[in-house]
Structure formats: structure tokens, C-alpha cells
Amino acid sequence: MTQTLSGDKWTIITHNGKWKQVTDKDMVNKANELKGYISYVYKLECGFIHLSDFHNYETKNPFIKLDFSEQFDIILYLHQYHNYPRDRLLTVESIAPFIPNVFEKISTNLACYFDAILNDEMICTKNHNLNQNEFKVVVF
């Protein structure tokens, strides 16, 4: 976090104890370990960041590049957290009205994660006994 906030390039310590700059390949490899919506967001966003036909979303639906199970999971996440209709096809146009709420949820989660990091804690999860936007920190 310090490197990000100070505008420095990300570095990590290797298993040899040497500093190494984090590369795009490192990020792709790490993303391949991710599960759930984070992996889908990463996969879609990479398509928009790098030169690809994802930029042609007005004429070709970028979601069809995902396999059925990935599309299904995205619909379930959108339905569970944002009331997206489960029978609606995923398109840029169909999710556009949901994007502000998705970003708000991501922002709220990131604030919780950053708070946990700053307090040397590991992760935070939603406590279903709390109000919708309240979280608790789980220390591992």
C-alpha cells in the first residue's frame, strides 16, 4: 500500500531474499489463483486495458468471451448483491445501471481491507448480523 500511495513501482522480496519489481506477468499469475468475482473482474478488465476486441463492445458483447459458468457466476453475484435479474443476458448495456452500486460495494470493501492492513490484520468479511454496509474484521 505504501508503494501504491507514494507512486512507487511495486516490488516484492523473492524467495532468495532479493527485491524484484512486480510485472504484469506476476499479476496475471496471481490473478489465476483468485476465485470468485475478483477473477472475473480481472479477466474482463484485462480485455479492456489491453488491445482487444473488447473495445468494440457496442457491436460485439464482450461477455460472450467468458465461458458459460463464468457468465453464470457474474449474474449470480450481480443478482445477490445488486438485484440483477437472473434471466437477463450479460451485456454492457444491461449492467450499466448497476455499475455505480458495484463500484460503491467495491469501494466499501476496499476501505475495510485497507483498514485491516493498516492495523496489521488480514481480511474483513461481511457480518450478516450487522447492517448492510457494516463489516467486521477477521484476524487470522
Image: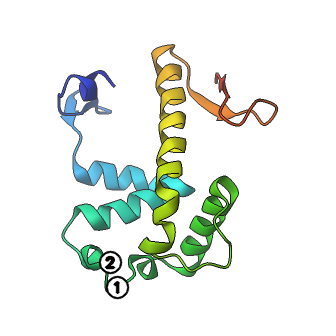
Helix, strand or loop at mark 2: loop
**Which residue of the protein is positioned furthest toward the right in this rendering?**
129
Q: Residue farthest to the top?
A: 119
Residue at 57 percent across and 66 percent down: it is 74
Amino acid type, residue under disc 1 in the picture: Lys
Q: Residue at x 34, y 25 (%)?
A: 1
Q: Amino acid at mark 2?
A: Tyr
Q: CA distance from mark 2 to mark 1?
A: 5 Å
Residue 117: x and y, percent?
48, 21
Residue at the image point whose x is 39% and y is 65% from the top? 44
Image-based side of 111 in relation to 43, left or right: right
Name the one closer to the observer, 13 or 76.
Answer: 76
Q: Is residue 13 above or below residue 92?
A: above
x and y, in percent, of residue 136 in the image: 68, 25
Residue 134 lies in quadrant: top right
- Residue 78 position, x and y percent, is 61, 61
Residue located farthest toward the bottom when viewing the structure as drawn: 59
Query: Relative to residue 91, is residue 48 drawn left or right?
Result: left
User: Alpha-carbon neighbours of circle 1 within 10 Å: few (<14), some, or many (≥20)?
Assistant: some
- Residue where numbered disc 2 is placed: 57
- At 42% from the left and 72% from the top, the residue drawn is 92
Q: Tell whether 7 sits left or right of 67.
A: left
In the rendered image, residue 120, in percent from the top left (x then y), is placed at 51, 15
Residue identifier under label 1: 60
Q: Do residues under tags 2 and 1 come within 8 Å of each other at their CB atoms? A: yes
